[in-house]
Every structure is written in C-alpha cells, then in structure tokens.
Image (cartoon, grey):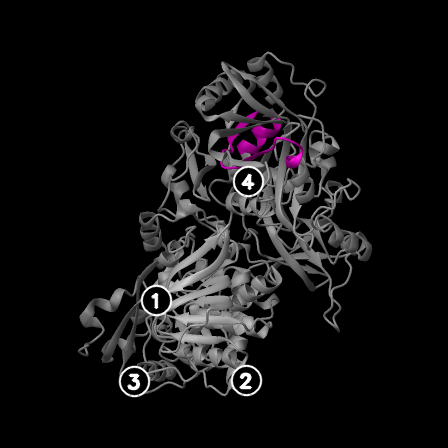
Amino acid sequence: MRSCSVTGWNRLRAEVFPQLLSDVVCPFKRHLSNSCRRGSSTVPVSNVSPLPSQAHVVICGGGIVGSSVAYHLSKLGWNDVVLLEQGRLAAGTTRLCGGIVSTVKHISVETKMADYSNKLYQRLAQETGVQTGYIQTGSISLAHTQDRLISLRRLVSRLQVMGIPCDIISPKQVAQLHPLVNIHDLVGAMHVPGDAVISPPDVVQALVTAAVHNGVQIFEGASVNHVMVEKGHVTGIETDRGHIECEYFVNCAGQWAYELGLMSEEPVTVPLHPCEHFYLVTRPLKQGLRPDTPEPLLSALLRRMPSLESTEILQLVNCPESFTADMRCIMGESAAVQNYFVLAGMNSSGSSFAGGAGKYLAEWMVHGYPSVNVWPLDIKRFGRLQSSRTFLRHRVMEVMPLMFELKVPRWDFQTGRQLRTSPLYDRLDAQGARWMEKHGFERVKHFVPPGKDLLELDQSKTFYKPDWFDIVGAEVKCCKEAVCVIDMSSFTKFELSSSGGQALEILQHLCSNDLDVPVGHIVHTGMLNERGGYQNDCSVVRLNKRSFFIISPTDQQVHCWSWLKQHMPKDSQLQLEDVTWKYTALNLIGPRAMDVLSELSYVPMTSDHFPSLFCKEMSVGYANGIRVMSMTHTGEPGFMLYIPIEYALHVYNEIMNVGQKYGIRNAGYYALRSLRIEKFFAFWGQDLDTFSTPLECGREFRVKFDKGTDFIGREALLQQRQEGVCRRFTMFILDDHDTDLDLWPWWGEPIYRNGHYVGMTTSSAYSFTLARHVCLGFVHQYNENTGNKLVVTPDFINRGDYEIEIAGQRFKAKAKLYPFSSLFTQKKRKDEMELSSFQGK
C-alpha cells in the first residue's frame, strides 16, 4: 500500500474500530514482520504425510484458540489429539491481530480468562523455549465524561477483588505514563499495569511446541469437509486428505466456524459473523516511546494523540474478525450433537481470551464441566433463531461500535428485534409498553403512562436513579394493593409424557424435589448436576399420571432441552415437546386477582377451593382449556394463566375489562424484579448457576433425600450437608444509601464483612415496600493463611458488619438470611413465600 497521511484517508473509521494501532508499541512491528516472513511452522507438523485413521479428539483450526485447546488437553492427559489447519498455523486472523492482552472486561468469567491468558503467555517462553513477544505494557482506559469515569470505577472495584492490580488515575498521571496523550478534556482514567502485548503467531508456536511434545499431532494443509454423526454423537470427520474416526470434535475455525457447523449430518448452529478489522503500521515516531508504554483503548485515536496526525503510514492491515450477537464468545458443547464442542467468536479479543478459554474448554471435555461458571459464554444460550445470516449481519453491525462504548445498566440491543413476540405485542405496545429482549423474545420493561415524554424515557441511561423509577413504583403499588397483569409468555415450556411410568421415573432421577405428587400439584425444583449445582431451576405441574408440564427460565430453552434429551433413554416411550410457542402466559398479581378470575370463570378462587401451588384447567371468559395456576413467581397473591395462543387476545381483553372496577393495570418485568428481590427469590443465570447448590441458598426444603430415588447430585448434597456449606445466599438492605443522590447498585458490587471482601452481589433492585435498595449475593469465608474455604454458618452471617461497594464508595448494609416477611403489609403463608425463583427470565 502506498504510504499516506492519516488525514488523507479520513481517519480510517476511527469511530468504528477504536483499537487503531500505530508503531508506538514496538512488538507490533516485529510481530508483523515475523508473521510475513515465516514460511512454515517451526514445530513438527506436516502437510504431506497421511492423516491418522483415528484419534480421540480432532480440533479444527490452527490459530491461537485451537492451539490453546490442544495445549490444555495435552496438559490434562489427553494426548491422542489431532489438530488440523487448512492453511498454515497462525496464518489466519491470528497472524494479523493486534496482540493486545487486556483484563478489562465487563463479565467476570471473561476477566478470569484474560487474567489466566496473561499469566500463561508470560511463562510460555520459559516452558517451551519459544519467545512469544510478551511485553507487560499495562493499559490505560480514558474517561472524558463523568459517566465513563463511573463505569471505570465500577470496573476497578470488581477487578481489585479479583486480584488484578488497577486504579483510577488523574489526567496528569496519564500524561506521565503516556506523553503523547492529549489530556485537556479528560476527567480521569483507569490504569491496569499488568496488561500486555504479545506476538500471537509466536504464542501459537509456543503452544503447539508444548502440545506436540505431549503427543498431539498437528497437520497443516488439511481441510475438514464433513463431521459425521451417529445417534446424536460425533463419530468421525471427512477431510480433503482422508477420513478420521474420533469421539470428540472441536470447532475452532474462527470466521469459518459458522459454515463448519453446517458441515455436519446434524447441523450445529454457531451464531457468529465476520467483519472487517483494521489497524495501521506507521514509520517510527521521531521521538520514540519506550516499548512498555501503556496503550490507551480509545474511540478516536487521532484526536487523543495529535502527534500521529503527520506520521507516515506504511501499511493498512484489514483482516476479518468474527463477532457474536451479544459481544460474548461462544464456548461449549453443542445442544444438537454430543461431543461436538465449539470455541469461537472472540469479538476482537482472541489474544486476551485464548489461553483461559482453551483451559476451560479442555476442562469441560475432560472432566465434564469447567472449573468456573461459563454460562454467559455457553453456546446453548443461543438457539437456531439467532443463526439467521440477516440477523447476524445486522446485529454485528451494531455490536462492533459497542465494543468500547459506555456500558450503562439495562441497555438493550436495537437490531434483530421483534423476532419473537407474544400475540399481545401490538395491544401492549399501543398502551405504552417499553420493550427489552431476552433470548430473542420481546418482554415489557414497564408501561409509560399517558402524557409522559417517551423520548425522555428512551434516553434514561444512567448509573443513578432512572427516569422510570416512579412508573415502576406505581406498578409495584398496584400489584400489592389491587391487581396487575404481566405478559410472561417468554417462559420456556415443555411437556413430557409417556405411555407408562417412564415420565415420572426420569423426572424423579433429574429433579431434587419429589415429583410423585397428586395430579394438579405444582412442584418447584432444581435439576442438579453431579456436584449438586443447578443445571436448571423450574416448576413442574403434574397434568395426569403420565404427563408433566415443565416451566423454565426464558434463556434455558436450549440448555434445559439439551439436559433432558441427554438423560432420556434412547429407545424409550418418552415424548418431550417444546410447547413454548403454544401458550401465552399471563401473570395476574395482587389481592384482587381472585375477584377478577372468579368473575370470569364463575368458579370460586379462594384458597379453600383453589389451594396454593395447584393447577386447574378451566374456562376464562369464552375460552376453555386455560391452565390456571395458583402462583405468581413474586410471593404476592395471584395466578399464572397459560392460555392457548388462539385465545390469548380474548382472555386478555376480558381480564382488562372485568378488572377495571378492581383498579387493574399493566405491569412489566422491572416491577416483577423489584417484587422478587425483596422476597429473596433467587434468579437462575444471575444468582444461581451450575456451582450453586440448594443448601447454599436456603432451599434444602426443595430437596427430598428420602423420596426413594437416587437423583443426580444427591451424594454431593449429602456430603455438603455433613461438612457444611462454604458460602450462603444472603440478602442485604442498604442503610445509609440515598436513592435520589447516590449511585445505584445494579449487580456485581463487592461485599465486605468487617472490612474483608467476602463476595459479590448477584442481583439488586429498589424495594418500594422497604423504601431501601436490596442486594442479593453469596457470602463466602476463606482462611487468610491457607486460602482454603471455611464453613459459613448462619451465626457467621448474622454477626458481621457489612458494606456494599458501589464504584469505590462503600455503603453500610444489613444482612439477612430470610425475607423481611414481618415488614410487608400482608402476612403470607410459608408456601407462598417460597414460590418459584425464575421470575423475570
């Protein structure tokens, strides 16, 4: 490319891709030249010898990600591994990427992956003798607005308790660290001294050198054409150089992972999309910088570093990089094919994530699960509905500019919307519904009353008290004093049936609670893994002796289906059907809900005639076949109505018409969230995960050890009950927090007990009943000398003085292990206080 000035080609999309790189950091120049002159790999690989006829694992993709998986599998003792690369090792995106290793991530598991990667790259040279170009430059994230600074302060609070040194620094300190940075409009910055840069191709050489030493075979110039599947399992692959039988297949094909997923007898959805990815190579600056100068992560490089304006450009590097629909990478076992694993979609962070992601995926394959909760990255968070090329193209065009945009609480994607909607969508939208999206499903946040400024509410993005505060407060008040209706159609709904007793048998094996209950009864239960952690949190209705209705969180649709299918006998008479689309779900909440339904059904709805946690099929208005359940997912009195979709509009209209005299109004998920958190209800995917057990969150009453069935996780729970739990789910009420003036807790805030860090908040909401903020989270205890976990007793919780840290400021909080039932206006029965934990999903 002919050299030109930066001004001459219009700042090279500096607004779209913020990490435009110059030669101010020396490793990039060396990395690019090394990559270009490297004619072949320096490790024992072959592009001419025949492929083996069989292997335990085949990995497709010889970039930094696939190499990391091979390295970590060999470290765990799986040496019968073949890695295939269609071209040359590290010749794809890895060769052209910038090599930045940054731990500044907004999701804890991503921070853990990046931190591990950093430490791995630092020691690889000593382990393998291959230099990786590792230089610990540190990083600077700049803030030119107060909101940006608040966001950085929140990050610092979280990173520090995760053991990552970082701090907020002043503009003058920025200039001292990086003299080229224009600091005139800065209000502060975050400095992470441990961040680094690497030469990614050299890291690949180091990884594969170690892997080959441990027995891994690597072949260049070998393309995977087809993945063979038999009875839902991987059995082998076809390549352009022959056939390989294998038990496991790993798709690390980067930008080609989507197409490779389709090259299977049972297609595997890998929802990612490639985009252009730029950086610049310039001539050296007249006054060079030290190699360890921190790199700012900027959205307008030239405005921030004016001295680069006249720097001569040697080369524009434009390569494809794969991005995902939610800005998080894709990891894990496919729901469609067992032993088909995916690790792809790095969102321009492959260097940061590859080491840690490869470690966690290898653990997953070898042990059956990774060592940390990776649900935010699990491929099963997506369904086929996110695989549309049009959807991905439009969503990724939105994702790229958001990579380094300000992250405010409860923001929503704008593209790919109205994909899955309730039959009531248009009716609710006309009444002022403001929408958010979950698993592609449109759900109401709240309703804007007539006369409110819609534009103002659309722009209510803040770390402080939001504009919708009073609106949600009014909806909560109506739920408590009159009656509200909330459309909760997004819930995942399955029906499991059999010709005999197989349906009950399999559920008894999968569920910790006892499902052998009379017809019509509702059971709240967890589906646990072998460690006793929650694979799923659900409500199960016994429709008849041989049929069950399973209600799960919205984003559990693929995950729960996969878990059920994985444990169902292959040749059984069991029938599992996803009926999510068949039913509209309306949550009728409030003390007058009974009056509304009684009038519409001509059936007494009192507790004597309709006990708690019971389901009846009945008529509502002109419609029949409505499954009415005496539960609300909030602890308030009321009912859930599961309505065949053809009757949805009629039933909704009848409810609203009859409900007028009882003060009925629409409500949304923000009100639901406030109600469930003040009642201490845990939320799967946010409070609960695959490492959380019922004993740790006060749900032992949902575990029936003596039901006569050896359910999954039973032994682990018995052992935990004997030894004691090492963390407990706890409610915190903020005491000295000013709702109007102080920063709000949203989630992810550190919890301190007697000045020591003991956990993180997992959910937060303002309780309109208590007129206080309520936070939920797990409290743990470690031996300060050994670092070993210690038993956390109720006495340990109750005797501590607690603080919640919000963006560096600590607020006193009261800890409770039980809900504040005595403070609520109505006394609830125990079973109503312990309703389902997955509302709002």
> CB of mark 1 within 8 Å of CB of mark 4?
no
Q: Amino acid at mark 2?
A: Glu
Q: Amino acid at mark 3?
A: Leu
Q: Relative to residue 628, is residue 444 drawn left or right?
A: left
Q: What element does badge 3 sit on?
A: loop
Q: Is residue 482 visible?
A: no
Between 245 and 92, the one nearer to me in the picture: 245
Categorize mark 4 by other alpha carbons within 10 Å: few (<14), some (14-19), many (20+): many
Query: Which residue position holds label 4?
Result: 840
Disc on res. 240: 1
How far across and how far down the image is residue 377, in percent?
50, 57
Q: How many marks?
A: 4
Chain-order first, disc 1 or disc 3:
1
Q: Amino acid at mark 4?
A: Gly
Identified at 57% across, 62% down, the residue is 364
Q: CA distance from mark 1 to mark 4?
A: 49 Å
How far across and how far down the image is residue 800, in percent?
76, 57
Q: Amino acid at mark 1?
A: Asp
Chain-order first, disc 3 or disc 2:
2
Query: Which residue position holds label 2?
Result: 127
Q: Does the segment drawn in magenta span residue 319? A: no
Magenta region, residue range: 474-503
Query: Most extreme residue toward the top, as rendered?
Result: 602
Judged by depth in the image, the label closer to the viewer, 3 or 4, is 4
Disc on res. 285: 3
Q: Quadrant of residue 508?
A: top right
Q: CA distance from mark 2 to mark 1?
A: 34 Å
How far across and how far down the image is residue 327, in percent?
42, 57
Identified at 31% across, 84% down, the residue is 37
